[in-house]
Image (spheres, rainbow, N blue to C red):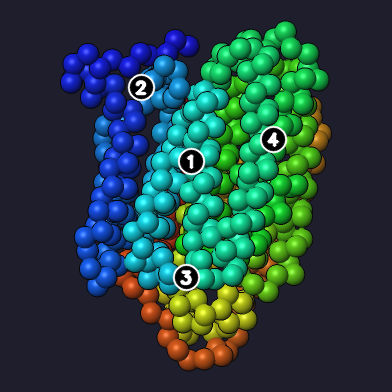
């Protein structure tokens, strides 16, 4: 694939060449606008900073849909640093949508809702994720990962006067720095073996490298990518970070950051290591890791009394389900992963939006304090119901079809290749889905059947209502109208093979 040169000989050519990454340029402008407003506005107006960020994300989504759709040839642009394909476009829209929803549910969140630098860092994290999804070069990929990571470290530890937040930021940073170093060593081996950094040139240049060296390289890369998606054994950071970080950021890390990690993981494995000599090893590894990740996440989630820690272990289990689709190593499997991540973003952000609002009233994230929520805030309890039933895989919600598609892809590939390990993986996944449904229903039992400890109503501001019901509509549409969504995901997945 020949890179398309950046043509900037005239203003018109310059603008045309910049259209594929126009959303990223606009994100930089949005950072500047938010910081300028934070500098000029009095404290009484600073709640509107979140509205500026949310509006900006919305406008950028519309601009991207109108002007930055990928070309049919999936061109490598900017000297081969970025790939302009449907897969990257799909993920970039998801990241922008996540930023919009998180901005809305941050408006009245204590300690962050009136801070311009908070929203600037959030926008910067989305910028890094966009480049993670579209990076076609090791150098660009590493810069994008570090841009995202540094922003997320800052956001996790943003509440400096809160010991849990400070601890979560420090732990996230230490684990992230350690795994990033190992991943970078894997990048250096790829360059050392081939003298190339472009992902789509590496595969052909690796033909002469012995399989043991390639398998070692894959393992080193999976340390960094595995940390991003919180797969076992790189999941240790998740419970403490989820519990200590501001709730909107916990939702952001658990959804957008995980999706960005999967975007990178899928692209690198399929672009750099398609050789059957190596593929058989990483597929076997994905099967084993998916089984362990699902089982460990669901098992430990059963004992949790804190809603954020429960969702942390749930998030680990959800990563395991997505890995089932990746283990299939087929266009259908990758399409199922893309669909699953879209569903998960809507579902988990809805859950964390509810957590933000309940915390404002109770000052607690303990599950017991959700008792009687259905009587104190019926609409909010309904959002909780839809989100948790979707996470549990109940039809006709998006979570059911997310699990159905990843399991179906694994069974199809297992039968086609006579791979019994994939069939057993689906069986383990179904058992885990049943276990997961149990603890989701346990939380809903507290919400709907237990008497309230206090009678204080939980108010839902208009911006929160818009964000939460948008997530609910997304969950329902992904379930009741799944065909076009999985069709788009299939087209995006086809670009990666």
The residues bearing labels 3 and 4 have C-alpha atoms spaced at a distance of 35 Å
- Does 186 sit above or below residue 364? above
Tell me which residue sits at (74%, 70%) in the image.
Answer: 303
- Does 73 sit above or below residue 382? above
Q: What residue sits right under mark 4 in the picture?
A: 182
The residues bearing labels 2 and 3 have C-alpha atoms spaced at a distance of 40 Å
Disc sitting over residue 475 in the figure: none
Mark earlier in primary sequence (2, 4)? 2
Q: What residue sits right under mark 3 in the picture?
A: 356
| Circle 1 crowding by C-alpha within 10 Å: few under 14, some 14–19, many from 20 | some
Mark earlier in primary sequence (3, 4)? 4
Tell me which residue sits at (72%, 59%) in the image.
Answer: 298
- Does 97 sit above or below residue 187? below
Tell me which residue sits at (41%, 41%) in the image.
Answer: 127
Q: What residue sits right under mark 2 in the picture?
A: 71
Q: What element carries label 4?
A: helix
**Pointers 3 and 1 in contact (C-beta within 8 Å):** no
Disc sitting over residue 147 in the figure: 1
Instruction: Indicate which label's residue lies in the foreground, 1 or 2.
Output: 1
Mark earlier in primary sequence (2, 3)? 2
Left or right: where does residue 462 sit relative to residue 152?
left
């Amino acid at each position: 694939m020949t890179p398309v040169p950046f043509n900037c000989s005239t203003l018109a050519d310059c603008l045309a060449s910049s259209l594929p990454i126009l959303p990223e340029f606009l994100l930089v402008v949005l950072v500047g606008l938010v910081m300028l407003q934070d500098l000029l506005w009095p404290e009484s107006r600073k709640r509107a900073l979140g509205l500026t960020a949310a509006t900006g994300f919305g406008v950028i989504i519309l601009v991207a849909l109108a002007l930055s759709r990928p070309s049919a040839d999936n061109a490598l642009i900017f000297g081969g640093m970025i790939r302009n394909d449907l897969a990257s476009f799909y993920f970039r829209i998801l990241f922008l949508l996540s930023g919009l929803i998180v901005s809305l549910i941050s408006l009245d969140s204590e300690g962050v809702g009136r801070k311009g630098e908070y929203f600037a860092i959030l926008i910067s994290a989305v910028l890094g994720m966009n480049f993670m999804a579209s990076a076609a070069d090791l150098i660009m990929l590493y810069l994008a990962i570090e841009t995202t990571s540094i922003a997320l470290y800052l956001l996790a530890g943003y509440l400096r006067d809160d010991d849990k937040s400070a601890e979560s930021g420090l732990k996230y940073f230490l684990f992230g720095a350690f795994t990033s170093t190992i991943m970078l060593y894997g990048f250096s081996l790829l360059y050392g073996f081939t003298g190339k950094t472009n992902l789509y040139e590496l595969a052909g240049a690796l033909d002469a490298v012995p399989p043991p060296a390639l398998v070692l390289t894959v393992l080193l890369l999976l340390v960094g990518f595995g940390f991003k998606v919180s797969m076992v054994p790189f999941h240790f950071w998740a419970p403490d970070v989820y519990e200590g970080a501001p709730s909107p950021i916990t939702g952001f890390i658990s959804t957008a950051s995980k999706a960005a990690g999967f975007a990178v993981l899928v692209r690198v494995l399929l672009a750099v290591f398609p050789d059957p000599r190596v593929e058989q090893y990483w597929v076997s590894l994905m099967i084993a890791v998916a089984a362990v990740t699902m089982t460990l996440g669901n098992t430990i989630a059963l004992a949790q009394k804190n809603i954020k820690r429960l969702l942390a272990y749930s998030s680990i289990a959800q990563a395991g389900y997505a890995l089932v689709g990746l283990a299939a190593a087929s266009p259908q499997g990758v399409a199922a992963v893309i669909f699953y991540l879209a569903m998960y973003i809507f579902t988990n952000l809805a859950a964390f939006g509810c957590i933000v609002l309940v915390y404002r009233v109770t000052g607690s994230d303990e599950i017991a304090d959700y008792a009687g929520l259905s009587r104190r805030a019926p609409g909010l309890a309904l959002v909780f119901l839809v989100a948790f039933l979707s996470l549990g895989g109940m039809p006709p919600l998006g979570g059911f079809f997310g699990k159905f598609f990843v399991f179906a892809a694994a069974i199809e590939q297992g039968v086609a290749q006579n791979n019994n390990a994939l069939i057993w993986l689906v069986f383990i996944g179904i058992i885990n889905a049943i276990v997961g449904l149990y603890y989701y229903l346990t939380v809903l039992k507290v919400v709907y059947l237990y008497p309230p400890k206090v009678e204080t109503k939980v108010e839902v501001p208009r911006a929160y209502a818009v964000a939460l019901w948008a997530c609910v509509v997304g969950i329902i549409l992904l379930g009741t109208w799944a065909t076009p969504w999985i069709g788009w995901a299939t087209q995006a997945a086809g670009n990666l093979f």
